[in-house]
Every structure is written in C-alpha cells, then in structure tokens.
Image (spheres, grey):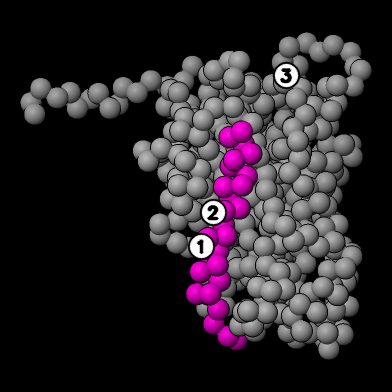
Amino acid sequence: MGGINAEMPRRVPRSDGLAAVLAMGTANPETCISQDVYPDYYFRLTKSEHYKELKDKVKRLCNRSGTNRRFFYHDEALVSAHPEFLDRTTPSLDARLDIVKTAVPELAAAACRKAIAEWGRPAEDITHLVVTTNSGAHIPGVDFRLVHLLGLRPTVRRSMLYLNGCFAGAAALRLAKDLAENNRGARVLVVCAELTLMFFAGPQDGHLQTLANQVFFGDGAAAVVVGADPVRPVELPIFEIVSAAQTIIPDTEEAILMHLTETGLGGCTPRSHVPALIVDNVERCLVDAFTELGINHPKWNDDLFWVVHPGMVGIMDRLDQVFELGPEKMAASRRVLSDYGHMFGATVLFVLDEVRRQRALQAKAPCPPKEEFQLDDWGVLMAFGPGVTVETMLLRAASNNTIPSQGN
C-alpha cells in the first residue's frame, strides 16, 4: 500500500466556466381544481358542508389568494379510503407517509424525464442527483428510488434534502452549482417534488391555519439539469448561475414554522409582518451580491429580469413598490401562482421555467439588436422560507431562443 498516492483523489479538476441551467422540466398530478369552485369541492370532499361560516372564510381566502387553479394528487377516492385524514385528532402520519413513499418519486420522475429529454443526453450521463421534498421522511428516500425510475447509473452521487420549506428549490440549485463547478464534467440533476397530502385535513372551528393550508398550496415537481462547460451542440445553456448566497434574517426563528406531527405535516403560514420583514432585507442581499461582482447600483427595473418565489401576494406587491418594478418584472411569478398555487420549493423552479418561456417569446418579437452580455441579460432569483432564510442568486441569460413546450 506504500506506493499509493493519497493525494490523487484531491486532484479532480474544476470546471473552466460557470455552472449553467441546461434543461428544465415540470410535472403536476392529473386532478386540477379551479379556485372558484374549490370551496364547494373541499367541503363536499371532507363531508363538512354544514360548516357554513368556515366555507365563507375559505371563499374569502380563495378570492385573495392570487390563484386560479391548483393540481392535487389526492382525490375523492383516496380521501374516502382514508377518513382519518379529515380529523386532526386522529393519528394519520403513517398512512400519509405510506402513500407519498411511492407518489413523490413518481411525480419527481415525471419532471426529471422532461428535463432529461430536453437536455439531449442519456440519463446515464447524470453524475450527481440532488433531491428535495417536504413531503416525506424515508430512508432510503426519493433519491434512491429515482435511480431505478430514471435508469441512472448506480454510482450516481446522491444528496437528499428533507423539510427545507419554501427555499428548498433554490437551495438545491445552489448545491448543484457547487457540485458542477468543483467536478469537471459533472452533470447534476436537481428535482423538487411536493404533495399537499401531508397536511390535507378537514375544516374545524378554531383552526384557521388548517383552512389556509388547503387554500394556498398545490402539488407539483420541477427538475433542472445543471452543468458547466457545455458540450455543444448537444448542450445549450439557458441561464448561467453567476453567484449564489444564503442569508438568515436575525430574530426570525419563530416567524415561519414546519414540523411533522402524528396527524401529518404541521406548521404555519408567515405572520402578517413577514412580507415587510423579508422585503426590508432583500435589497441588502441584492446589493451585496452585485457588489461582489463589481456592479454598483444596478437599476432594478431597467437592468434585470426577476425570478421570485411567489409564496405570498403581499411579498410580490411590496417588492414591486420598494424596487419600483414594472408589472412585467413579476409577471412570471404571478402567473405561476395563478396557474399552480404555492408548491413549496418547487415553485421558484416553475417560475424560472416561465421566465425562460417569456424571454424566448420576447426574443422572437422585433426589437433592436443587443450588445453581448448587456446588463438586462442579468437576473436575480430569490426564494424565502423558514428561518427566515433568503436565497439569492445572480443569473445571466444565454441567447437561446427556444420556446419550451409546457406540461400543463
């Protein structure tokens, strides 16, 4: 053994260029319910039509949600088979976990297959797999099951992130950047999949949080292939990930909470002061990120595209006001919230895909020629979650004008 050079494993070369998003894919379950009929659907589904006042509250919440439709894995047949899901006093965690053990990997795989197909290389070329979900707590987990479902090589290097809340998709993308840039030739498959079955429950007096959870959240999965030094012409970068950072806002540990209980996933939506708290700290995060690149005082409305996790309408409204943004800047975030609802960490990846689609459409419209790497090809990606944690990324858009097909 004396002739073995122990330093050899440390000599894996880094990439020459920045990590980039090379492909994206999204997926949702089949059941789609429009928000205007959801109150009637929900109270019929939960056999709770006698709760007239609670139904009125749900209608008001739906009207203020900014959402037009949502997708769900659970349907009438599943709920009928599990009456324990409706009663918050009846233990149901085991039954919920047993269902999502299969359902989450299948939904994640559907999004991954779309991303891999767009990427254009075989699944065996994926070297790293990063998976995040708030819907489950299994060992082996979703990452392990995806290896078989997608036909990945058994040596793929897996990272499984559980219960990171709404910033999980951005956190997984940040990890993928590190992996791609520090391992030459690495191709990282990132996927975030979420099912609201983990906190689905029937209405009860005194549990407004339960009603809010039913109104705002939906089911979905998003996948991204990340790699540096793209192999052309097969691989075409969509967005370069120029920088990535994570910041904890001080004294916010109790502002947004999540926890597993014997009746499923519990927690709370942000307190009323949280949108202002987040927005008050966002500008410092952005200024710090651009200053590190030698860019001072970018014009927030003129110079950037925005990829923002649309967790609350109030956060987007305040961002519009503070940064004096035109309506088109938050259009992708608002469209995703409208078409899918809040899907935890997967939501910001849906927004990234929507920004790609909108930019491709704009690029095909007649417009003056641009200089290479003009500042309006730069963008910011931001996601917020428990902690309160802020994920901040600076992106640079590539000049690929392909309009992707949409899953739904």
How far from the left and from the top, in percent, is residue 372?
Answer: 73, 11
Circle 1: residue type? Lys
Circle 3: residue type? Ser
Q: Nearer the viewer, mark 1 or mark 3?
A: 1
Q: Is residue 312 magenta?
A: no
Q: Nearer the viewer, mark 3 or mark 2?
A: 2
Check disc 3 and report the residue beneath it: 399
Residue 84 location, quadrant? bottom right
Gap in angstroms between the C-alphas marked 1 and 3: 40 Å
Check disc 1 and report the residue beneath it: 101
Local secondary structure at mark 3: loop
Tell me whether the residue at label 2 lies in contact with that at label 1, contact meaning CB atoms closer than 8 angstroms.
yes
Check disc 2 and report the residue beneath it: 105
Q: Nearer the viewer, residue 268 or 65?
A: 65
Local secondary structure at mark 2: helix
Q: Nearer the viewer, residue 19 or 268?
A: 19
Local secondary structure at mark 1: helix
